[in-house]
Image (cartoon, rainbow, N blue to C red):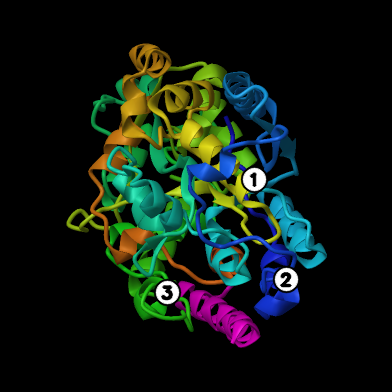
Amino acid sequence: MRRTRTRTALVAGAAALCLSITACGGDSEGGGSLSAPGPEALEDLDSTVQVEFWHSMDSTNGQVLNGLIDEFNAEHEGRIKVTGSFQGDYDTTLAQHRAAIQQGNTANIVQIYDLGTQFMIDSGQTVPAQSFVDKDGYDTGPIEDALLNYFTVDGELRSFPFNNSTPLMYINKDAFEEAGLDPEQPPKDLAGIREYAEALTVRGANGQVERYGFGAAVYGWFIEQFMARAAVPYCDSGNGREGRATEVLFDDPNVVELVEWWQGMIDDELAAPLGRGTDDAQAAFTAGRAAMTLESTGAMGGFLEQSGFEVGAGYFPLIHADDPAGSIIGGASLWINGAGHSDAETRASWEFVQFLLTPAAQSKWHAGTGYLSVNTEGYNGPEASERAAEYPQFSVAADQLANSETNINTAGCMMGVMSEARVAAEEAWEAALVTDATAADALSAGTDKVSRKIEEYNASVG
């Protein structure tokens, strides 16, 4: 399974232009409540309630999702019918949803990636997840705490976690054994990675590197992870959760140190210079060109299938050994639109979301896609248990998240231009690696660029 990666800032910019909220249709024109209806909304139905579900799951993930949709529809035949509709990658789905808001024709349920959370709140179209929880007394106890932490804003759960992941360190266990290193003890911080990379790097008779000790993509999500694990907020105002964020903080000394370390690893030919392409970084690892890498849990299935060596997994590394750790999530959540939809449609949408969050559905989802089981009880299901027995590496992600402290830092930054911020962080990081700019100067320029975008967005929403 591969996650969908943001490569441009176009959607965030378009979202900013779309708001103020009324310009997006956030005044609920066309009817529909933004509070959860009760089960009575599905009583005395004259016809099957149709639920349109927009998502970004294709290939294997789409097949698994379609199987769950079919299962739900079979259980509710004649009462509720869910129709799944693939809209493209995460950016495209958000853009399609924005256009649908303007046209007053949104889907009942839409899957939106983590970076779109603030926009979804600002759009004023959805019934807050907390409203359903409170209406039904729904027990969120089995839902992974770290996921609830991310999608809870101002004390209310705003959307329902669904396809979520966390990054890990992946290692070539064969290379570790060859170098006399313990493959069951991957390095835990930057100093450890360098030490191991020195032993893992292999040069040919001509002095050319045949295998680098380390190699990973210059990916903005990793900066967010390193900052959270160092207990450093990504943006101000309590990571945008105590008020509107006005600036990003990825020019923090910890990130400067990270980028300088990365540059040193490349200069000393201990790390492969892979740039921003996650596909290139994955290929370097599976081909044995890099003995250690950083990637999402979503890459694990592909690594296990495509690598000609035994793959190991460990926690995402720390900058310093004494950093407090913690982990933030990636992936997407489910939003139920209320504006423009009948109570019966909204209630039927909630019935479907509840089904997706059951242990039985989550066991199938986790085993079939590699995403985390949102409902922790799903790991005990037959499909998930079978997969864990065959591939114990999958338990590392669940353990890392379960051991992560939930706080403002691990909740992640909440702001309307997170997509642009991630791209800007990547560009600054890359500039420090390939130009004469120092890490401090490049990162500072990146934060200044994002500050202007934040100002524009905040002004647009009032």
Residue drawn at 43 percent across, 15 percent down: 383
Magenta span has 425?
A: no
Q: Is residue 294 left or right of residue 286?
A: left
* Residue that numbered label 3 is attached to: 240
Query: What's the amino acid at mark 2?
Result: Gly
Distance CA(mark 2)–CA(mark 3)? 24 Å
Where in the figure is residue 164, as x and y percent of width and height?
47, 42
Under tag 3, what secondary structure? helix
Where in the figure is residue 327, as x and y percent of width and height?
33, 51
Viewer-closest of 249 and 201: 249
Can residue 207 be seen in the rendering of this structure? no
Query: What's the amino acid at mark 3?
Result: Gly
Q: Is residue 101 left or right of residue 273?
A: right
Query: Farthest left residue?
Result: 322
Query: What's the amino acid at mark 1?
Result: Glu
Under tag 1, what secondary structure? helix
Q: Quadrant of the N terminus?
A: top right
Tell me: residue 242, above or below residue 262: below
* Residue that numbered label 2 is attached to: 25
Under tag 2, what secondary structure? loop
Q: Is residue 118 left or right of residue 50?
A: left
- Tell us which disc is closer to us: 2 or 3: 2
* Residue that numbered label 1 is attached to: 345
Viewer-closest of 266 and 399: 399
Where in the figure is residue 292, as x and y percent of width and height?
42, 36
Q: Which residues are magenta?
A: 436-462
Distance CA(mark 1)–CA(mark 2)? 19 Å
Residue drawn at 49 percent across, 42 percent down: 39
